[in-house]
Image (cartoon, grey):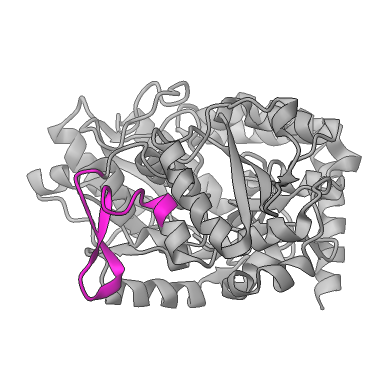
Amino acid sequence: MKLWKKTAFAGMAAATALGMAACGTSGDTSDSSTDADGVTTLLMYQVGDKPDNFDELMEIANKRIEEKINARIDLQYIGWGDWDQKMSTIISSGENYDISLASNYVANAQKGAYADLTELAPEYAKEAYDMLDESYIKGNTIDGKLYAFPVNGNIYAQQVLTFNKQYLDKYDIDISGIETYQDAEAALKTFHENEPNIAAFAIGQSYNISGDYDYVIGKEYPFAIKLDGESTEIINQYEDEEQMANLKLMHKWYNEGLIPTDAATNTTGYPLEGNTWFMREETQGPMDYGDTILTNAAGQELVSQPITKQLKSTGQTQMANFVVANVSKNKEKAVEFLGLLNSDAELLNGLVWGVEGDAWEKVEGQDNKIRLLDGYLPNTRMSAWNTGNNMILYTQESITDEMIAERDENIANAEASPILGFNFKTDNVKTEITNIANVMNRYKSSLTTGTIDPEENVPKLVEELKTAGWDTVRDEMQKQFDEYRASQE
């Protein structure tokens, strides 16, 4: 999935999208208020497309919220395409609101847009706060202060190669020994020989090769830390032997027809539910329960093999952050609501699974197990990844106690990135970063999809990156990282 993000979008979002279709934010709805009965209304922004039964969901939710904390939520949705610009306008104009999913979390926190929750969260949302993995706190602390209440979800991520099981069965292909890209070659070749007109490795323009790295400002940029080497030095992963070996492999596969010829320009992708692909790369985390979420989203059985470590990273901890506006007149009540949303199972499950009795019912004798009903339809609920604490969500009957125990064990044992909690301040190198992004836009898709020869083109890429200011950015990044590491000792 580039699952909590990618599968949040490929799988989870496809299956359970929470969002909003740019509902209006006119002046008469922008002020939080307390009515004559003392009930506080909190204005909250969320991203995406709102559920078709939004009014019903919120009527049920607000009844519970009012009973518990004497508040109601005015939830406004903003579509994905408008989200960053709309929230930027709201923040820069000083418009009053109470809560939102974070937009450009680090930058806006540093600008003072978000309230300091360092003391408020443990006081007003103690039960939910105490459930958070310590990595969430570390990953969201900026200059010693916490500005977010993160959704407790996929605290670690792992890259996997995912296979369409119908084709594994049809051609009796064994994937049990796959641990690297190279290991998958035999399976890809067998499939391609039998189905030359179907994408063997279904990748497109946005594809990023994975490796044992963590990325300081994202996979799109050439700044990384090696997880199995010198973990204090920031490098250009394109100059690393592991990355070069994988780039060469992709180029070989491209020439052999295992990668689609239009991969570098394809922006439409390959639907999970289709039979147009054999292998793809996804991201999974503990709340995916193996291939359960992917399979549910696809409507057909999918099976995966991991190719990277289970890694707790800054990116994962900031995947879905709720923030309280610094302009809010109700900061304590806003945090109290976030505490309720992330600790009250009745409230959260009614939003994420839909209306009880219509979409689902509890399994008799098992308080935390549910059975889906005919009313469990698309767009009738909110998605788990950016709504609330996944640890208190009910699970379907297919999720066994053993799977839950494995989830918890994996969370406890997942490796923490060497740069977990390090947030690079770009103020001094904004021009260079823009120049570097322009260079990467010219090379990345063609290289990672195998369309061009890496031995010929990586040296050109490296040279152009240096001209764009890579050394300047890297030196500033290394300086800040060294200072961060010293502050943690």
In this picture, is 299 found above or below 147? Answer: above
Left or right of 205 in this view: 362? left
> Which residue is painted at 65% across and 35% down in the image?
459
Which segment did they paint magenta? 350-375
Left or right of 412 in this view: 121? right
Asked which quadrant contains residue 443, the reply is: top right
> Which residue is painted at 26% across and 53% down in the image?
357
In the depicted view, which residue is nearer to us: 468 or 365? 365
Whole-percent x, y for residue 275 in the image = 20, 33
> Which residue is painted at 48% across and 51% down in the image?
61
In this picture, is 179 found above or below 15? Answer: below
Which quarter of the image is occupied by the C terminus?
bottom right
In this picture, is 31 found above or below 154? Answer: above
Left or right of 157 in this view: 111? right
In the depicted view, which residue is nearer to us: 225 or 295? 295
In this picture, is 198 found above or below 185? Answer: above
Find out whether residue 409 is within the magenta segment: no
Which residue appears farthest toward the right when viewing the image? 428
Whole-percent x, y for residue 428 in the image = 91, 41
> Which residue is painted at 38% across and 58% down in the image?
288
